[in-house]
Amino acid sequence: MDRATDRPRAPRAHHHREERRAWPFRPAVALLLVLVPALLAGCSALAPPAAPAPGQSTEAVRPEMAPEPTDTRFHLTLLHFNDIYEITPLQGGRVGGPARVATLRERLLAENPNTLTLLGGDLLSPSAMGTAKVDGERLAGRQMVAVLNALGLDVTTFGNHELDLSKDELVQRLGEAEFDWVCGNITWADGSALPNVAPYEILTLDDLEKAHAGEGGSLRLGILGAVLPNGAPDYVAIADPVATLATQAVALRDQVDVLVALTHLALEDDARLAATVPEIDLILGGHEHENWQIWRGNDATPIFKGDANVKTVYVLDLYFDRESKTIDVEPELVWITDQIPDQPETAAVAARWAQAAFDGFRQDGFEPEQTVAVTTVELDGREASVRNRSTALTDLVAQAMVTAGSADSVDAAVYNSGSIRIDDVLAPGPVTQYDVIRILPFGGDVVTVEIEGGLLGKVLDQGVANRGTGGFLQYAGIERSEDGTWMVAGSPLSSSATYRVSLSDFLLTGRETGLDYLTEENAGVRVLAERGDIRKAVIAELQTRFPAP
Ligand SMILES: [Zn+2]
């Protein structure tokens, strides 16, 4: 029988909250006077272990890692993940799944009661499930907060995607969370604190066994948090993350034994933080969607990030030596797969929310759980890819639109890359209708238009100008030659000719960047037909191109 199923649920990590400062954060001036000894005392010697070879998988069940009996170092285990958008496993159920992470957490807690579960931000959005309406309201991350509550998450920081929500939705989610939010560089626009968000926290963990042996087992753990400032809405103010963390790290250093920065920053900013703020012992990050382990700075501060959607998580065993003030970190990248059983309560919560969301999708005519295709190529839907170039996925969507408009004999199809929201790579394998909803959560109709060549050229040029944003245009049946000439159906675009093109209906609203003139009112455009939801078109295209065996 499996360890996870024959034992009652492990209790939460044995720690109590020592301090949770209210905003604004004001470092005590007196701290500066003791800064130099504090720095000396707090400097951590971190020994980088050999990094695992790229792609090397690790065992789902960890080997026993208990220190030798004579080891009086404090043993802290950190379970870290980041950028989680899905509450159920991906790729036909083979990878990811927070309920499996919950099982891993229970196993870690059984090995070491001083285990904390941390999240590097990006949990509330974007997700297809978040767009489903339940009880008349968009879920907007409600499903994820419920699952992470069940999982037993201890602390998260903010990701930039938390700010996709409206202010009201965000306040609701912050209120529902049973875990702590730590972020030192975010406030409401007027400078006031977000509810239930602390700039930092200090946890005191008690190793009772060692305390009883007269070895003074407690450890004070400082956790800082920060989010990247790009693209934030007007309702918040975000200060420079590295500068903020530097100030707070100096102020906290002598109050704690171990100082962790839980960040949602670009890797280069994490590296800069590691190199320039020696007070920080360890950086647990997010945002890249790919696992990273790098060590930077004179004291070799390690930075760890997992893959998005808990395809991988990091398990870090920290050993703090009170005598020498040194910390040893033993990192392990753990792949979350179907080799790890679900933790039943977390799985039940996830299943309940998934069914509620799927019922909403069924009302829109989808069968979310149906496998529509088994692909043989990677479908890249990452924002960094689709907003800058075409991929097999963007071509598939464009071709689906051409097929949808075939009754109108369309020459080409054009859509905005911002309609692709999955921000993930679909590996070759089974694709469900829900995966298609994940790719295009906003849906919308494929519309056949007759458009004047001059206007079409202007639209396509704007698409090039929009590179790097959601207004970058994707197309099929159209090519751009070296000298910038547009080719439609193999011939140079003629400004006096008229073309039949499939457009996404959003493009005809005039709301795309630089395309406010592209509406049904424009004399150069004539709408001929509506050819149904773009997601239905993509499902049909997948079925034709990659039929399930
Ligand atoms: Zn992010």
Image (spheres, rainbow, N blue to C red):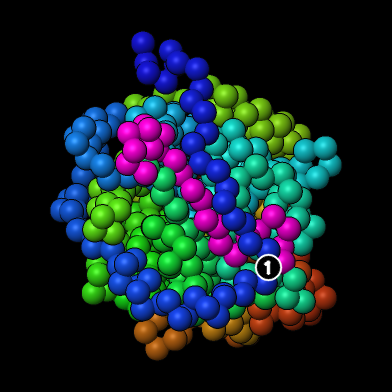
Q: Residue at x 74, y 48 (%)?
A: 175
Residue 365, x across and y down, in percent = 71, 35
Residue bearing the label numbered 1: 23
Q: Residue at x 42, y 20 (%)?
A: 4
Q: Residue at x 40, y 88 (%)?
A: 483
The magenta span reads 193-216
Answer whether residue 394 is visible to the viewer in this image.
no
Q: Residue at x 77, y 38 (%)?
A: 134
In the rendered structure, does residue 214 fall within the stretch colored magenta? yes
Quadrant for residue 495, please give it.
Answer: bottom right
Residue 320, x across and y down, in percent = 30, 51
Residue 549 vertical placement versus 448 (above, below): above
Location of the N terminus by quadrant is: top left
Answer whether residue 174 is visible to the viewer in this image.
yes
Of 37 and 246, which appears nearest the observer?
37
Of 541 and 300, which appears nearest the observer?
300
In the rendered structure, does residue 509 fall within the stretch colored magenta? no
User: Relative to 158, is 393 on the left or the right?
Assistant: left
Of 508 and 361, which appears nearest the observer?
361
Quadrant for residue 110, please give it.
Answer: top left
Q: Amino acid at mark 1?
A: Trp
Tell me if mark 1 has few (under 14), some (14-19) or many (20+) residues whose alpha carbon lies within 10 angstroms of its own. some
